[in-house]
Image (spheres, rainbow, N blue to C red):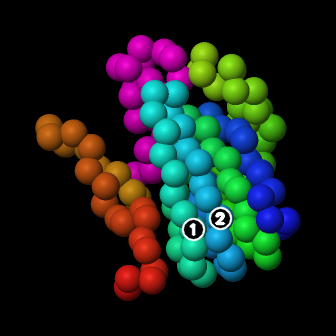
Amino acid sequence: SGKGESRGRHAHKECWQTLVSLQGKIEVHLEDGNSNKEEKLDSPGKSITIPPGIWASQVYDKEAYLMVLCSHEYDENDYIRDYQEFLDYVSMEDGEFRELCDEFRSPHLWSHDVNGWRRLQTIWCDMSRA
């Protein structure tokens, strides 16, 4: 990738993506419709998992390489590529949005009981601290 190249700029309806840095530095910009977050993938193996319903974009440093692991095969209908469409998609009532998200929780990652949802496995791990 070229320095400062921006990629991504979309959200998914169902697909989860895990972004894994292979080389260089990548800024990952995330938005859920209410708040923004920035993560830096700045060492080989550092990764972040992005659930459905999150607008994501990446800015690449020169010579940066990223591997993307997806929960679903490619389906163009799963993509939200228009930012206004994304905002409309996530502007549903909080309870409705949570119910929709809950439908797609992977049982090998999540468990639900009277106390709510609990993650069974680590989703994000900073390998530089392992």
Q: Taking 36 as reference, is 61 above or below it?
A: below
Q: Can residue 67 be seen in this view?
A: no
Q: Which mark is residue 26?
A: 2
The residue pinned by badge 1 equals 41
For badge 1, the amino acid type reads: Leu
The x, y position of residue 123, in whole percent, is 42, 62
Q: Taking 112 as reference, is 20 above or below it?
A: below
Q: Can residue 127 be seen in this view?
A: yes
Residue 124 highlighted magenta (yes or no) = no
- The residue depicted at 52 percent of the width and 28 percent of the height is 33
Front residue of this view, candidates 31 and 118: 31
Which SS class for mark 1?
A: strand
Front residue of this view, candidates 28 and 13: 28
Span of residues in magenta: 90-107
- The residue depicted at 77 percent of the width and 52 percent of the height is 6
10 Å neighbourhood of mark 1: few (<14), some, or many (≥20)? Answer: many
The x, y position of residue 101, in whole percent, is 45, 34
Instruction: Describe residue 19's horizontal placement relative to residue 94 as left or right.
Output: right
